[in-house]
Image (cartoon, helix red, strand yellow):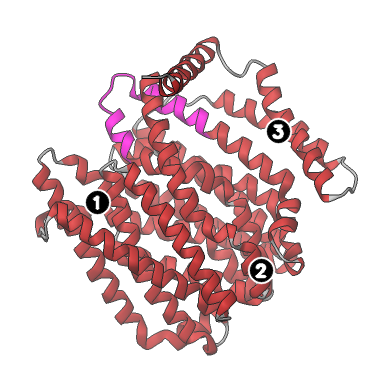
Amino acid sequence: MIKEFRTLGKHALIYGAGFVLARAVGFLLLPLYTRYLTPEDYGAIELLDLTGFVLATFMTFGMDQAVMKYYHAWSDQSDRNRVLSTSIHFSVIGGLATILLVAPFKELIATYVLGSSKYSDLLYLSFVTLFVANLHKQEKTILRAQHRSTLFTWVSVLYAAVAIGFNIYFLAWRGQGAAGIFYSTLVTSTLFTVYLTWLIFKQTGIAFDVPKLREMVKYGIYFMPAGLASFVLNWADRYFLRAYDTIEAVGLYALGYKISMIVVLLIAVPFNQIWHSYIFEVEKQDNAREVYARVATYFLGFLTAVSLGIAVLGREIVIIMAAPSFAGAAQVVPVLAAAMIFFCADNVFQVGLLIKGHSNRLSSARWVAAVLNILLNWLLIPRYGMMGAAVATLLSFITSAVLIGYRAQKVYFVPFEYRRYAHMAAATVVPLGACLLLPEMQLWAAVLAKFCCWLIFPLTLLGTRFFSRAEWAGMQQLLAGIEWRAWRRRAPA
C-alpha cells in the first residue's frame, strides 16, 4: 500500500502546486478586489460566475469526466488520441452553441439574476469569457488524463502569473471595475487555450470520432444532473440572499465562502486531479478496497486539520486580506469551514458509484440534498441572513455526504474507518472551545494564540493513539525514502 500512497501523493503534490497557483489568483488578489470593488460589485461578479457555472454544465455534457474514463478504456494510442481530439471539438461546438442561444436573452437573464438589465453587457461578457475558460479547462483535463503533471503545473504557474498581471492592469490601471475581472480572464484564457490546442493537436492529430463521442456523451451526460445539484448545494443561497437581503450581502457572503474554500483549494482540488483517474487503476489490485478506505481516512484527516485552522483564524484572515467594508464576512467562516469537510468527503465516499458506473445514483443523492438546501434557504435566510445561508449549506452538505456514502456502499462495499472519523471530530472540540475563551487582542497576538489552540488538534491525535504502529512504520518508511533521495541529490558525483 505504501507504493500506492507514494504514487498518489507524488502526482497530488505536483497537481496541487499547479492548482493552488491557478486557483489562488482570486484569493491572492482579494486585497486588490476589495479596494477597487464595492461589496455590490463583488456580489454581481459572484452571481455572474454562478450563472456561468450552470451554462458550463450544458456546454460540456460531463466531457471532462468522460475523458478521464475513456482515455484509459483504450490501450491503443491512436484510439486514445481520437478520444482527446474529439473531446476538444465537442467542447468548441457545445460552447459556441450555448453562447449563441443565450445572446437574445441577456437582458432578461440580467434582470432575473442581478435585479437590473443594466448588467446585461457585463453578463454577456462573462458568458464569452466562460466559453474560452471552459475550453482551457477541458484541455487541462486532457493533461491530467495523460498524467502530464509537470506540463500541467507549468501551464498553471504561467497562467497565474499572467492573470495577476492582467487583473492589475484592467482593475487598478484602467479602472474598469467588475468588467476588468472578466477582461483579464478572457485574455489570459485565450492565450493559453491557443497554445494548448496547438500542443494537443500536434500530438493527437485532428479527428472527430462520432462513435467514441456517442459513448462519451452517454457516460458524461449523467454527470449533468449531478453538476446542477452541486450548483444548487453550493450556490443557490446567493440568489436567496439577493432576493431576501441585498446584493451587498451576497458580496460579503461570497468573500466568507471563498475564504472557507481554502481547504478545497489546498487539499481537495489537487487530490481530485489524480484520484478520479487513479481509482480505476487501483480497482484492478487485490487490496483495492483497503486502499480506498485508508486514503479516505488520511484525506478526511487533512481536510479536518485545514478546516479547523480556517475556522479559528477566519476573522484574522478577513482583516488581513480584505478592506474594512468587508469585515462582516468573518461571521460565516467557521460554519462554512465545517461544511467544506462534508462537501469534499463526497470525493472518497462516491468511489463505489464511479467504479460500478452508477453516476445516476450520484445525481439523485445530490438532488435530495439540493432540494433540502432550497427549503432551508427559504426558511432560514429571510430570518437570519448570511448565517442562515451558512447553516443551510452545512446541513445540506452533511446530507449529501451521508446519502452518497450509503448508496455507494450498497453497490461496492469499502471498509471505511468510521470510528476514526469520530475520533478526529472529537479532537476538534478542545481547540474550538479554547479559541472561544480568548480575550480581544492585537492582530499578531490573536494569530499566534489561535495557532497555539489549533496545535491542540494534532497533539490530541498523537496523544490518543490515532495512528497505528503499522502507520507509524509506513510514515517512517516514506520519510526515509524522501531523506535518501535528498541525500543523493546533495552528494557529489
Q: Which residue is drawn at 65% across and 32% down?
A: 425
Q: What is the quadrant of the N terminus in the image? A: top left
Residue 100 appears in the figure: yes
> In the rendered image, which quarter is residue 133 located in?
bottom left
Q: What is the quadrant of the C terminus in the image? A: top left
Q: Mark 2 points at which residue?
A: 34
Of mark 2 and mark 1, the one earlier in the sequence is 2
| Distance Cα–Cα, label 3 vs label 1 | 40 Å
Residue type at numbered disc 2: Thr
Q: Do the residues labelled 3 and 1 touch (CB within 8 Å)?
A: no
| Distance Cα–Cα, label 2 vs label 3 | 32 Å
Q: How crowded is mark 1: few (under 14 residues within 10 Å), some or many (20 or more)?
A: many
Q: In this view, does 17 lie to the left or right of 115?
A: left
Kindly report the secondary structure that dominates the magenta region of the rendered protein. Answer: helix
Viewer-proximal residue among 351 and 206: 206
Residue type at numbered disc 3: Thr
Q: Name the residue under label 1.
A: 219
Residue type at numbered disc 1: Tyr
| Distance Cα–Cα, label 2 vs label 1 | 42 Å
- State whether residue 374 is above or below residue 145: below
Q: Which residue is drawn at 61% across and 36% down?
A: 304
Q: Could you say which disc has been placed on residue 428 in the image?
A: 3
Where disc 3 sits, the SS reads: loop
Q: Give the range drawn in magenta.
A: 277-299
Q: Residues within 10 Å of mark 3 (few under 14, many from 20)?
A: many
Of mark 2 and mark 3, the one earlier in the sequence is 2
